[in-house]
Image (cartoon, rainbow, N blue to C red):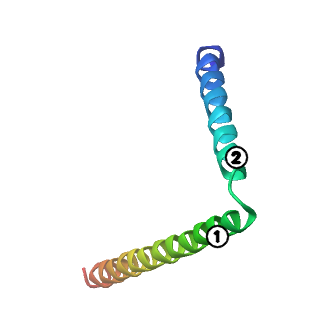
Amino acid sequence: MLNIFQPILDFITEKCNEFVDYVLGLFSSFSDIMQALILLAGGVLVLIGIVAVIKKSAKLIITIASILVIISIVWMFI
């Protein structure tokens, strides 16, 4: 079964390696200050994304927990 997917995996790996080499080449063409600014901006965006995911997850957890509490109360009275 793995022999069927191996050529596809090899192709994807080769293309990903080419993309990483391109991005690293492009990134290294910038000055040191510009590289630091790009990394800082990327870090800030990652932190904003993490906070957004945590906020949405917290709302989901609270919603599921409240639904389960309501279901358990209804189940006790049936």
Residue at horizontal 61%, vertical 29%?
A: 15
Q: Is residue 41 left or right of residue 69?
A: right
Q: Is residue 62 left or right of residue 41?
A: left
Q: Nearer the viewer, residue 59 or 72?
A: 59
Q: Amino acid at mark 2?
A: Leu
Image quadrant holding the N terminus, namely: top right
**Residue 14 point in image, percent of width and height:** 66, 27
Could you say whether the residue bearing mark 2 is in a helix, strand or loop?
helix
Q: 9 above or below 64? A: above
Label 2, residues with CA under 10 Å away: few <14, some 14-19, many ≥20: few
Residue at horizontal 24%, vertical 79%?
A: 78
Quadrant of the image occupied by residue 39:
bottom right
Q: Amino acid at mark 1?
A: Leu
The residue that disc 2 covers is 24
**Residue 13 point in image, percent of width and height:** 66, 30
Disc number for residue 37: 1
Work out how far the residue at label 1 is from the one at label 2, CA to CA, in angstroms: 16 Å
Residue at horizontal 39%, vertical 74%?
A: 60
Quadrant of the image occupied by residue 50:
bottom right
Tally of marks: 2
